[in-house]
């Protein structure tokens, strides 16, 4: 674990942040999250139930596009997915999955979860959403 933390620290120094991707396990779908944004005054970003090769570019793009401005919470983000699909950022109430962020950063970790819709543009908090593996760590946005 020490070598992993050292590698991530160097990525943060070099790029300003790093993305940690965790593959699918026995009881947990794959997920990925940023580390290093907290030290820049931003919440970390988290995405659930996408393969790392899909999640990493989305997280990196979200950071690049929104590093100078606050990522809007609860509003559609149309600039992160193709095909007319929007994501929504929700405040994470449970940040325990961000193990590396906790190991490297002192203090309270804040994080936003990027939530994506199913093929019919339905979000997990809506009726009929086909995405059953996307675990939510925050509340649905107020509509």
Image: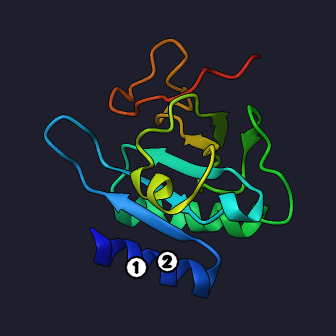
Above or below, comparing residue 44 to residue 57 in the picture = above
- Tell me the quarter of the picture where residue 141 sits: top right
Q: CA distance from mark 2 to mark 1?
A: 5 Å
Residue 103 position, x and y percent, is 44, 57
- Neighbor class of circle 1 (other Cα within 10 Å; few <14, some 14-19, many 20+) is few
Residue found at x 57% / y 77%: 12
Residue found at x 58% / y 68%: 60
- Tell me the quarter of the picture where residue 134 sits: top left
Residue found at x 77% / y 65%: 67
Residue 124 position, x and y percent, is 49, 24
Colour scheme? rainbow
Report the residue that reaches farthest toward the top: 127
Above or below, comparing residue 36 to residue 32 in the picture = below
Q: Which quadrant, please, contains the C terminus?
A: top right
Depth check: give the residue in front, 128 or 36.
36
Q: Which residue is mark 2?
A: 9
Q: Which residue is mark 1?
A: 6
Determine contact: label 2, label 1, CB under 8 Å. Answer: yes
Depth check: give the residue in front, 84 or 59.
59
- Neighbor class of circle 2 (other Cα within 10 Å; few <14, some 14-19, many 20+) is some
């Amino acid at each position: 674990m020490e070598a992993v933390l050292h590698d991530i620290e160097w990525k943060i120094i070099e790029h300003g942040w790093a993305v940690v991707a965790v593959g699918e396990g026995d009881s947990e779908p794959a997920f990925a999250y940023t580390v290093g944004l907290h030290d820049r005054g931003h919440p970390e970003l988290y995405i659930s139930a996408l393969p790392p090769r899909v999640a990493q570019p989305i997280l990196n793009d979200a950071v690049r596009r929104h590093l100078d401005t606050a990522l809007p919470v609860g509003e559609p983000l149309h600039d992160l997915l193709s095909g007319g699909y929007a994501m929504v950022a929700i405040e994470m109430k449970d940040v325990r999955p961000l193990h590396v962020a906790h190991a490297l950063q002192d203090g309270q970790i804040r994080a936003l979860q990027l939530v994506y819709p199913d093929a019919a543009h339905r979000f997990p908090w809506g009726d009929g959403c086909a995405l059953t593996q996307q675990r939510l760590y925050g509340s649905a946005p107020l509509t």
